C-alpha cells in the first residue's frame, strides 16, 4: 500500500473497510468468546463468505460466537445441530431456514411444553424440552440455539446458552 493509505484516518474509509478493520482487531485478540453484532454489514459478498469461514474456524477451534444478525442465511449456514428456544409462530421460518442450509433441528424448548410438543410434531422435530438446562444436559452435541422469544428474555437465555458452550442466534423483533 502506498504512503497515503497508511496515513489515512480510519473514519475516512468506507463502511465496509471500517468493518474489516474491526473484524481484524477482534480476531487478533484471540479471545475465548466473540460478540459479533451485524458483522457482515457493509461487506461485499466475497468478504461475507470469508467472514463465515472465519466464524466456522473459530467454532472448530473451541471458541464461542454470539452472533447478532438480520441476515438469517448467515446464521443458518454456520450451524449443523440446532435447537429452537420458543415455540411461537416464528419457529416455522427458523426451522425451514436451518434445514434449507443443511442443519438438523434436534429439539424445541419452551416453558409451555404443550406448545413445544405441538410445534415439534408439526415440523417433525424429535425432542421437546420444558427446560433449557435439561436440554443442554441431554443434547451434548448441540451446536447452537436459535432464540425466538420476546426480546426481554434474550439476555438470560443467551447467557445460559453461552455458559453451556453453545452458539447463540437471537431473533430480534
Image (cartoon, rainbow, N blue to C red):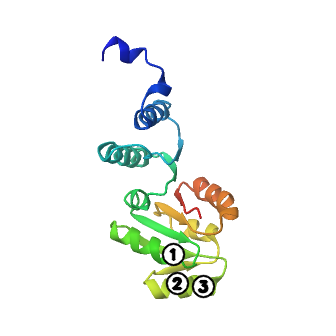
Label 3 environment density (alpha carbons within 10 Å; few <14, some 14–19, many ≥20): some
Q: Is label 1 in contact with label 2 (beta carbons under 8 Å)?
A: yes
Say what secondary structure mark 2 lies in. Answer: helix
Between disc 1 and disc 3, whose residue precedes?
1
Q: Quadrant of the C terminus?
A: bottom right
Left or right: 111, with 21 as reference point: right
How far across and how far down the image is residue 108, in percent? 53, 76
How far across and how far down the image is residue 48, in percent? 35, 46
Q: In terms of depth relative to the viewer, which is nearer, 47 or 106?
A: 47
Between disc 1 and disc 2, whose residue precedes?
1
- Which of the numbered marks, if any, corresponds to residue 157? none
Instruction: State how far apart marks 1 and 3 are (Cα).
Output: 11 Å
Kindly identify the residue that appears in the image at 37 percent across and 49 percent down.
Answer: 52
Residue for badge 1: 91
Q: Is label 2 in contact with label 3 (beta carbons under 8 Å)?
A: yes
Residue for badge 3: 115
Is residue 40 depicted above or below 104 in this figure?
above
Kindly identify the residue that appears in the image at 43 percent across and 84 percent down.
Answer: 124
Say what secondary structure mark 1 lies in. Answer: helix
Say what secondary structure mark 3 lies in. Answer: helix
How far across and how far down the image is residue 28, in percent? 46, 30
Residue for badge 2: 119
Q: Residue furthest top?
A: 3
Instruction: State how far apart marks 2 and 3 are (Cα).
Output: 6 Å
Is residue 104 depicted above or below 43 in this figure?
below
Q: Nearer the viewer, mark 1 or mark 2?
A: 1
Amino acid at each position: 500500500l502506498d504512503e497515503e493509505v497508511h496515513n489515512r484516518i480510519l473514519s475516512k474509509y468506507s463502511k465496509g473497510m471500517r468493518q474489516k478493520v474491526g473484524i481484524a482487531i477482534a480476531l487478533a485478540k484471540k479471545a475465548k468468546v466473540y460478540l459479533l453484532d451485524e458483522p457482515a454489514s457493509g461487506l461485499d459478498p466475497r468478504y461475507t463468505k470469508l467472514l463465515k469461514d472465519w466464524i466456522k474456524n473459530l467454532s472448530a477451534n473451541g471458541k464461542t460466537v454470539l452472533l447478532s444478525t438480520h441476515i438469517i442465511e448467515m446464521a443458518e449456514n454456520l450451524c449443523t445441530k440446532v435447537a429452537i428456544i420458543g415455540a411461537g409462530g416464528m419457529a416455522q421460518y427458523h426451522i425451514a431456514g436451518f434445514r434449507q442450509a443443511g442443519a438438523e433441528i434436534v429439539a424445541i424448548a419452551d416453558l409451555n411444553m404443550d406448545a413445544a410438543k405441538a410445534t415439534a410434531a408439526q415440523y417433525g422435530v424429535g425432542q421437546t424440552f420444558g427446560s433449557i438446562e435439561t436440554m443442554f444436559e441431554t443434547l451434548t452435541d448441540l451446536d447452537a440455539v436459535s432464540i425466538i422469544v420476546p426480546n426481554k428474555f434474550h439476555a438470560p437465555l443467551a447467557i445460559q446458552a453461552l455458559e453451556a458452550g453453545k452458539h447463540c442466534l437471537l431473533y430480534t423483533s
